[in-house]
Amino acid sequence: MKTLIDFDWTVMAPELTIAGMAALLSVIDLFLHPNKDRRFFMWPTLIAIGTAIGFVATQWGKPAYQILADTYRVDDFAFVFKMILLIGTALVAVISYGAFRREKGFAEGEYYYLLLVALLGGMVMTSSGDLITLFVGLELLSIATYILVGMRKRAITSNEAAWKNVVLGGVASAFILYGMSFLYGLTGSTNLFTMKERLGEALTSGYDLYAWLALFLIVFGFGFKVAVAPFHMWVPDVYQGAPTPITAFLAVISKTAAFALMLRVFLTGFLPLFQGGGGTLVDEETGGRLLLTMAGLSMILGTVIALRQQDAKRLLAYSSIAQAGVILVPMATWGPFLFPSTVYYLVGYLFTTLGAFTVLMLIEGDAGDSKLSSFAGLSRRAPLTAGAMALFLLSLAGIPVTVGFFGKFYILMNAIVTGSPEHWAMYLIAGIMLMTTVASYFYYFGIIRMMYFRPPQRREGLRVPVGAMMVIGIAFIATLGLGLMPQWILGILGNLDWGAALSPVK
Amino acid sequence: MTYTASYLAVAVFFLLGLALPVVALTAGRFLRPDKPSAEKSISYESGVDPTGDSWVQFNVRYYLFALLFVVFDVETVFLYPWAVVYDALRADMGLFVLGEMLFFVFFLVIGLAYAWKKKVLEWT
């Protein structure tokens, strides 16, 4: 028998680095004088993330490997998502540097290590092969973000946001657990691959109602975590109340981790519920319809409600709901480019959204609020920042030469090649995507019009800290570079073994 | 349909649980004599006359204490079965078993240190 020591523990090196640094920082924070400035915590945070990125890079491309009784798996799927999470968190840590100077009672030390803990949760989620590790990762991420959302403890909006996040997040977790308990009852296992084998049997032997019940419960919970309609009610208030870097974290890292989770669970454990007859994966008897409905609803609701927003932070929150709907499309339509199109879009979304939120954070710090009118005349006060923001908004809207355009195009193409007269739902979802994209121009261009064609409220230039400047620069280069040369990242994604993520390691 | 049938027992228990207090109180209402007096109407608190308002403010530290208690309670739940099968596990995996639990305890100790430094353990 193989003992635990014989396993290759180095595959967990990225997670152990992050966990170790979070523990170390929490101890340092405790024994450091309370009045000491804790801004420098950003540096150890960045070092830990950098080391973890290095570990992931050295493991990149190695065959799939499972440890801890097959509950923890490291494969290409996990590497890609871990890379996105690590880079995203690093950028969030950089823009947080010194962002809370004026905030009274802000526990800045705790802020950085909770960020690491949330990241650790996300990483565990991406490489779990078992419902238990998956749930532990999900809760690690969720609980850390509940606290992070409420970090501005003197601000009433932050308290409200934290409260809503805790209560609704707890309800969602309870639904996920309830669904998981049904799955365990049906299959007698928490392992995703064992579940896949036995769930098909359960479907055909009279337990189909329970299998569907489990799917609905889990979709409800996951829908909440990725913030798609109709489970999006918490998003605007929580996004608005949270400190802006944390809003960016929720919009990018939490969402990406939850999508990784959804892909893992639906493409392995739940696969029997999604496989229809006749070669394609969506027909009346499969769960694909459910995801298609959610995707369409999010795009429509997110876009329509965003049209009426007067607050840039709420606008971006509704826009993130619409974006989540777009990201859900490949998963709902399946098709040949399921993984590459989802991951490409997520990479683009990471840089674009982080850039947009960074600019928003600067505006917020300058004007004291996040109203659309605070953007007035930005092009005259800070031409470079305004130009970068315009590019991020164009990318979110999906205008050519940006990463957002190619991402949407790729997803659209994937939906259309999967469609056929019998599977007209693909054409429908593609049509909804096109229409909501056109409608979204209206509000994205609203911000651009504010920045370029309205007189500024103040004369003096916008103060841009070095960290924020760097993040805006990186996001700008990535948004433009990946849009002009998508083959760079598509080449990397094409060489990965996505099939390995869906099959157990022997 | 045995899987469904097994929920029948749950349903029966649920109904019994609902019915029991309702039936007991309703039956009591019909059986008992009804002669209230001022003294009888006082809420019963172990024979002592109740004082003050029922809306009493508790010190918020009760909750912190309770949370801390739960953490260590759960630790015991993990430690105990581990200790019971320790010899068997040790024969199988060597000292790794000990290291594993020490890792867990280490993280709990950080939590305790946090509570201690944040003055959760002090009442005033």
Image: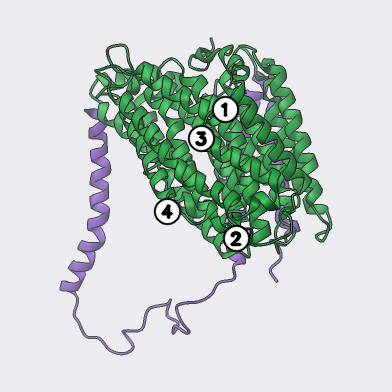
Chain colours: A green, B purple
Residue that numbered label 3 is attached to = A258
Residue that numbered label 2 is attached to = A369
For marks 3 and 1 on the same chain, the one whose residue lies earlier in the sequence? 3
Label 3 element class: helix
Amino acid type of disc 3? Ala
- Residue A141 is situated, as x and y percent measured from the top left of the image, at 58, 41
The residues tagged by marks 1 and 4 sit, at their Cα atoms, a distance apart of 28 Å
Image height of B47 relative to A430, above or below: below
- Residue A43 is situated, as x and y percent measured from the top left of the image, at 80, 41
For marks 3 and 4 on the same chain, the one whose residue lies earlier in the sequence? 3
The residues tagged by marks 3 and 2 sit, at their Cα atoms, a distance apart of 30 Å
Q: Which numbered disc, 4 or 2, marks the residue closer to the eye?
A: 4
Residues flagged by tags 1 and 2 on a common chain: yes
Amino acid type of disc 4? Arg
Question: Within 10 angstroms of label 3, few (less than 14), some, or many (20 or more) residues?
Answer: many
The residues tagged by marks 4 and 2 sit, at their Cα atoms, a distance apart of 18 Å
Q: Which numbered disc, 3 or 2, marks the residue closer to the eye?
A: 2
Amino acid type of disc 1? Val
Q: Which numbered disc, 1 or 2, marks the residue closer to the eye?
A: 1
The residues tagged by marks 3 and 4 sit, at their Cα atoms, a distance apart of 28 Å
Q: Which numbered disc, 3 or 1, marks the residue closer to the eye?
A: 1
Residue that numbered label 4 is attached to = A308
Q: Chain of mark 2?
A: A
Residue that numbered label 1 is attached to = A401
Residue A81: which quarter of the image?
Answer: top right
The residue at the far left in this view is B30
For marks 1 and 4 on the same chain, the one whose residue lies earlier in the sequence? 4
The residues tagged by marks 3 and 1 sit, at their Cα atoms, a distance apart of 28 Å
